[in-house]
């Protein structure tokens, strides 16, 4: 079996700026979703092309927020892209507001068959799915897993997708392997399983792809949580991939970038509500650009 250091999902031509469709929600206040993905992918030298799945006044950690479902506009939005001949090198999806939005992503897959497919299944955490995720939406999300070039679930999302029972974050290698196998069996080409914590001060992510050895990437586990770190992690991981880095390097880079951003965030006012402050670590992403 090969080592993941040899797996590079994207080869970037010299001087080329790749286009990435970002199918995520947009929050006016709070650090998450498109508010993270656009600057991170732009810092990675990509043309970040948003497809907003919902509009929020603020993220859902705030007790008061307004949500607008953009589903009715998506067909016309993508019709205009098609008429203009928009070309894409990657399709990166995150939080979805309605089951019908899966069809919009599948449309992008059909119209851009050579584009990388990155699915961050933002469905839940801590053993519970998010309130907006109905059974129907969870079922539709499984449609995106089949054929995904990269799938990045946490343990809760992996459980929802596969039916493997959620057993907390402190799980052994046997459980991790069973979860990875189940996710690959759903049709994902590569999987990064996030958030394994075994009480030793480390947070672990595991990477799997058929024909490659499973790799573990461990990073310092900080004693607090922040909103938006998952979006930052996946966006940084994709940014590194679009810069031509190996999948293993990209996972290591994203893990360290999130840690660095979380350390910086602690000095900001009201940081526990606002979410992860990534702005000062964007220079680390810029340094990846070939």
Image (cartoon, helix red, strand yellow):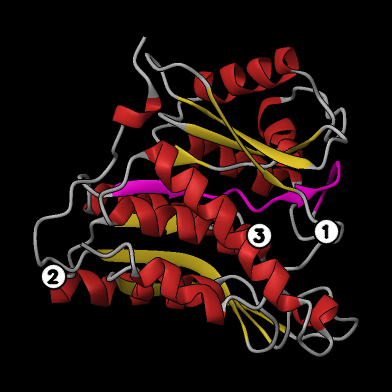
Q: Position of residue 103 (x, y in %)?
A: 45, 53
Circle 1 is placed at which residue position?
Answer: 131
| Residue that extends furthest to the top in the rendered view of this protein | 1
Checking the image for residue 190, the label placed there is none
* CA separation in Å, label 2 and label 3: 39 Å
Marks 2, 3: nearer the viewer: 3
Checking the image for residue 259, the label placed there is 3
Q: Residue drawn at (67%, 26%), measured in percent from left and top?
A: 162
Checking the image for residue 85, the label placed there is 2
* CA separation in Å, label 1 and label 2: 37 Å
Q: Position of residue 119 (x, y in %)?
A: 49, 47
Query: In which quadrant is the C terminus drawn?
Result: bottom left
Local packing at callout 3 (Cα closer than 10 Å; few below 14, some 14-19, many 20+) is some
Q: Residue drawn at (22%, 52%), measured in percent from left and top?
A: 112
Q: Position of residue 102 (x, y in %)?
A: 50, 52
Callout 2–callout 3 Cβ contact below 8 Å: no
Marks 3, 1: nearer the viewer: 3
Q: Earlier in the sequence, mark 2 or mark 3?
A: 2
Query: In which quadrant is the N terminus drawn?
Result: top left
Q: Residue drawn at (69%, 88%), measured in percent from left and top?
A: 29
Q: Is residue 49 visible?
A: no
Q: Residue drawn at (66%, 59%), measured in percent from left and top?
A: 259
| Residue that extends furthest to the left in the rendered view of this protein | 14
Give 166 or 284, whichever is nearer the viewer: 284
Q: Position of residue 258 (x, y in %)?
A: 61, 61
**Magenta segment range?**
116-129
Q: Determine if the magenta segment contains residue 128.
A: yes
């Amino acid at each position: 079996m090969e080592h993941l250091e040899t797996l590079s999902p994207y080869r970037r031509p010299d001087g080329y700026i790749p286009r990435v469709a970002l199918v995520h929600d947009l929050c006016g206040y709070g650090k998450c979703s498109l508010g993270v993905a656009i600057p991170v992918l732009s810092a990675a030298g990509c043309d970040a092309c948003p497809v907003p799945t919902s509009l929020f006044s603020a993220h859902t950690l705030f007790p008061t927020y307004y949500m607008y479902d953009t589903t009715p506009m998506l067909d016309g939005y993508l019709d205009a892209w098609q008429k203009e001949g928009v070309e894409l090198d990657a399709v990166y999806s995150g939080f979805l507001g309605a089951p019908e939005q899966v069809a919009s992503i599948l449309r992008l897959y059909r119209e851009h068959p050579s584009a990388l497919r990155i699915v961050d299944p933002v469905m839940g955490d801590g053993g519970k799915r998010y309130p907006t995720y109905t059974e129907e939406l969870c079922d539709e999300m499984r449609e995106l897993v089949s054929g995904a070039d990269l799938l990045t679930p946490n343990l809760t999302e992996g459980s929802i997708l596969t039916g493997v029972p959620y057993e907390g974050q402190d799980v052994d290698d046997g459980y991790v392997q069973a979860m990875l196998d189940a996710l690959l069996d759903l049709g994902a080409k590569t999987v990064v399983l996030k958030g394994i914590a075994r009480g030793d001060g480390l947070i672990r992510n595991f990477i799997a792809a058929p024909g490659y050895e499973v790799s573990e990437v461990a990073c310092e586990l900080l004693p607090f949580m922040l909103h938006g770190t998952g979006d930052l992690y996946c966006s940084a991981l994709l940014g590194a991939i679009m810069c031509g880095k190996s999948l293993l390097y990209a996972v290591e880079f994203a893990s360290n970038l999130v840690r660095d951003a979380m350390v910086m965030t602690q000095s900001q006012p009201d940081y526990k509500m606002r979410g992860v402050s990534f702005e000062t670590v964007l220079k680390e992403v810029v340094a990846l650009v070939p």
